Image (spheres, helix red, strand yellow):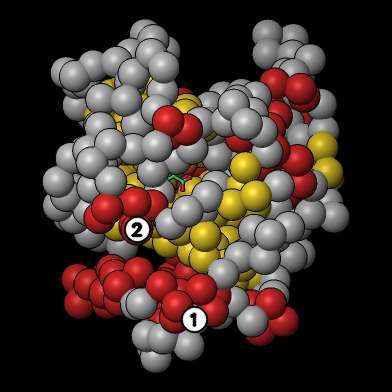
């Protein structure tokens, strides 16, 4: 296994990306339509016994079962805090390479600063540098990859992930409620005692070949649920819908984009599908995003909730323990691990 050169360095120096970044068939397009992603008011979900709350639940159910995304608005995080989240991320990637390398991902690990692990010679690389940090369990201190700079990095990340953890609880309950399940806590319970919370800070530098290079190749997330703070100015995320067409995912200023991950597709017995998505490159603008992934306790077994299995909808997936364990190797070689669990 090897690692690739920092894309940030390539971006400033090459006029044409190295061969291993180029997709033979290009990315398709160029005219991708915009997807309509419903905006959900978080404050209404917490008051869901009101008629307005009921409507919001229906909207959430409809959005997750049709496209797999919602945009959470009125979430209680103010603009100045979200600017800080963007700010520390930008500051981290702007540090000299030598400083960033103090947080470098160990070769056989995922936590830390770096980019694609190279598993094979014919793997196409993503035009993206990233910093992965496990928020829970807190392995950061042990691995010494926690950035010392910028100084307020840790504080900002912990506050952001706490806010999203609370948001995720509200949304998991709302999802169960919207499905008329008796047990409102059923998805939350499947997350187990010690869910994992993983953060991913993404830098997508400008790329001279947006027609042939992807910033992140097509994938479904391994998480149960993913929360993304998009760049407020530069679009890039695209999603594949059932009509076989790629759609652009719109930006709503400081909304949190939420998508279903593979493990919630399993728990919901396929009612909520984990959307396939990718990130395209931009010829002259840099893009920065921050993703937080929530996954079940790796020691607990997850599977389709009983209340969602009946004669009309038989069980679609086998149960599984530690779904994320083999995800990355499958991802880099273009396979979907969820497909191995289908009955
Ligand atoms: O940065 C984005 O727009 C999406 C990132 C993503 O899909 C991921 O980190 O799994
Ligand atoms: Fe993703």
Q: Where's residue 221, x and y in %? A: 55, 39
Which quadrant would residue 44 be assigned to in this image? Answer: bottom left
**Crowding at mark 1 (Cα within 10 Å: few <14, some 14-19, many 20+):** many
Which quadrant would residue 35 be assigned to in this image? Answer: top left
Residue 78 in sight from this viewpoint = no
Vertically, is 107 above or below 325? below
Vertically, is 3 above or below 145? above
> Which comes sooner in the sequence, label 1 or label 2?
2
Which quadrant would residue 119 be assigned to in this image? Answer: top right
Front residue of this view, candidates 295 and 209: 209
Front residue of this view, candidates 21 and 277: 21
Under tag 2, what secondary structure? Answer: helix
Under tag 1, what secondary structure? Answer: loop
Give me the disc on residue 9: 2
**Quarter containing the C terminus:** top right
Vertically, is 25 above or below 87? above
- Residue 285 appears left or right of 258: left
Residue drawn at (79%, 54%) of the image: 298
Give the residue number, with chain letter if any, for mark 1.
147
Q: Is mark 2 within 8 Å of ligand 1?
A: no
Ligand 1 positioned in quadrant: top left
Front residue of this view, candidates 32 and 82: 32
Question: Hey, which residue is sitting farthest bottom in the picture?
Answer: 151
Residue 284 in sight from this viewpoint = yes
Cα–Cα gap, marks 1 and 2: 20 Å
- Residue 177 appears left or right of 53: right
- Residue 172 appears left or right of 54: right
């Amino acid at each position: 296994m090897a690692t690739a050169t920092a894309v940030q360095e390539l971006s400033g120096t090459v006029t044409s990306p190295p061969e291993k970044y180029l997709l033979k068939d290009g990315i398709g397009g160029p005219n991708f339509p915009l997807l309509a992603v419903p905006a959900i008011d978080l404050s209404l979900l917490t008051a869901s016994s009101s008629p307005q709350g009921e409507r919001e639940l229906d909207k959430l159910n409809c959005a997750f079962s049709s496209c797999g995304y919602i945009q959470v608005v009125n979430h209680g995080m103010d603009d100045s805090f979200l600017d800080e989240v963007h700010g520390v991320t930008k500051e981290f990637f702007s540090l000299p390479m030598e400083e960033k390398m103090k947080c470098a991902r160990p070769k056989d690990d995922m936590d830390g600063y770096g980019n694609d692990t190279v598993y094979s010679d014919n793997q196409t690389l993503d035009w993206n540098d990233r910093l992965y940090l496990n928020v829970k369990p807190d392995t950061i201190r042990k691995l010494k990859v926690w950035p010392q700079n910028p100084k307020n990095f840790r504080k900002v990340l912990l506050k952001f992930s706490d806010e999203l953890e609370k948001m995720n609880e509200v949304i998991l309950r709302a999802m169960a409620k919207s499905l008329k399940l008796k047990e409102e806590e059923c998805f939350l319970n499947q997350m187990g005692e010690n869910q994992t919370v993983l953060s991913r800070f993404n830098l997508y530098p400008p790329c001279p070949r947006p027609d042939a290079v992807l910033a992140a190749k097509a994938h479904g997330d391994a998480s149960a649920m993913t929360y993304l703070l998009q760049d407020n100015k530069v679009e890039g995320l695209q999603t594949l819908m059932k009509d076989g067409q790629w759609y652009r995912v719109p930006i709503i200023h400081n909304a949190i984009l939420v998508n279903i991950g593979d493990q919630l597709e399993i728990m919901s017995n396929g009612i909520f599908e984990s959307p396939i998505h990718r990130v395209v490159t931009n010829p002259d603008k840099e893009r920065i995003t921050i993703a937080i992934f929530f996954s079940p306790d790796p020691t607990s077994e997850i599977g389709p909730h009983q209340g969602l299995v009946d004669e009309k909808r038989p069980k679609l997936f086998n149960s599984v323990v530690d779904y994320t364990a083999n995800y990355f190797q499958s991802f880099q070689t273009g396979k979907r691990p969820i497909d191995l669990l289908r009955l």
